Image: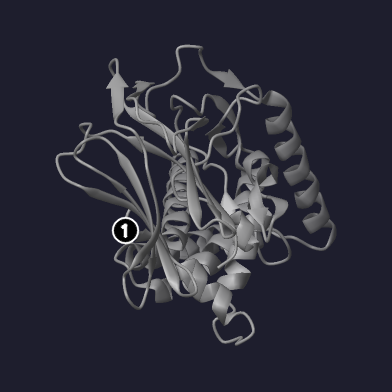
Amino acid sequence: MQDFAVSASLTIESSWPPPERVKALHQTMDHEFLEVHFTQSGRMRVYLRYIDTGFIFAEAVSPRIRLVGTGVLFLFWVINYHASTGKLELYINGEDVTSRSRRMEVAATLRPDTPSENGLTKDQASIDAALSARTQRVRDYERTGLTTEQKVRSIVDLKREFRLLSAANSALKRGDLDYTVPVSVHLRKLIGKGKGNHLLQDCAAFRGVVLPVWKRPPSDPQLWTPYQLIDSLDFWYAKEMFSLSPTHFLTCQTDIDDWLCRNGGALNQSPTTNVDLLHGVADKIGAHLDLKNRDLVEALENMHFGGVPIILSYLTQLGDLILALTASFLEGDRTERT
């Protein structure tokens, strides 16, 4: 087994410590699996087990974690495995707690859906850039013969893609991983790049409107979301989603195209934008019939966080957000026509 590093963040909104042991992460590797548990005593326990025997060959345990103040518990943790020593290292909120015995106190933070006290801002430059790019795209369409009938048909197509994505996303939430393919395809059709995609942005361009979302202010450090990375093993990860309303972390209004163009994480250890990350994940999923890529696809499906496959969490959350954004646009379009 090779060295690896796993990191993630977790916001715990229920009581702490948990009333019973909770499995937060399960990831299957070649011949082993990694599990992360939170115990009733408020400790974080990390195990590496052999799949065939269940024997634990590496383990790390945090000190007791005490929540101080009013709010929710936010933990950012990193797990390192060193094959040469066969040992695990555990870091929580930047502290090495591998061999620490004394209690660890963590200050409570506001709920993630509570807007920041620092106020809300707007990235007007990015919004203007998105509108300008869409206006130019419409001009390019018109030069090649775009008609009013085609614009109307685009709205019809958007409604159809909305219905198809809604049905596929609901099925994927039920745990049917076969629906990772249609969900990724419909997401790419709605907001992806390239010919035949970005249908939502095109429809917004025809009306000359913004597709407003909320992101982290540029001055704030980026945090990992709970379903994220195994980058040392050449998998993908995403940094953070956007929101349709302001939250404690996402307080800067922008346009969906700005979020899509932002650095979203990594794919095969190479930094990439959110739109490229979406395309990359869709391409990997679409390789089910390509035996050369099957191992990677199965690995993506075998990575779990909180008992849920990471690929399912990523696609369904992005699907929910795009469905809500599309519904908001269609409602505005209906209101404008009445």
- Eyeballing the image, is 11 above or below 236? above
Quadrant placement of the C terminus: top left
Residue 303, given in percent of the width and then of the height, sits at 44, 63
Residue 248, given in percent of the width and then of the height, sits at 44, 24
Q: Which residue of the protein is positioned furthest toward the top in this rendering?
A: 118
203 and 307: which is toward the camera: 307
Can residue 191 be seen in this snapshot? no
Residue 139, given in percent of the width and then of the height, sits at 81, 50
117 and 311: which is toward the camera: 311
Q: Which residue of the protein is positioned furthest toward the front in this rendering?
A: 85
Q: Which residue of the protein is positioned furthest toward the left in this rendering?
A: 19
- Eyeballing the image, is 150 above or below 138? below
156 and 119: which is toward the camera: 119
Q: Residue at x 56, y 78 (%)?
A: 295
Colouring of the image: one colour
Which secondary structure, mark 1?
Answer: loop
Can residue 162 be seen in this snapshot? yes
Q: Residue at x 55, y 56 (%)?
A: 85
Quadrant placement of the N terminus: bottom right
Residue 225, given in percent of the width and then of the height, sits at 48, 42
Answer with left or right where residue 288 lies relative to residue 195: left
Mark 1 sits on what residue? 307
Q: Residue at x 62, y 79 (%)?
A: 293
Answer with left or right where residue 21 lies relative to residue 293: left
Q: Residue at x 61, y 86 (%)?
A: 290
- Eyeballing the image, is 42 above or below 2? above
Q: Quadrant of residue 278?
A: bottom right
Q: Amino acid at mark 1?
A: Gly
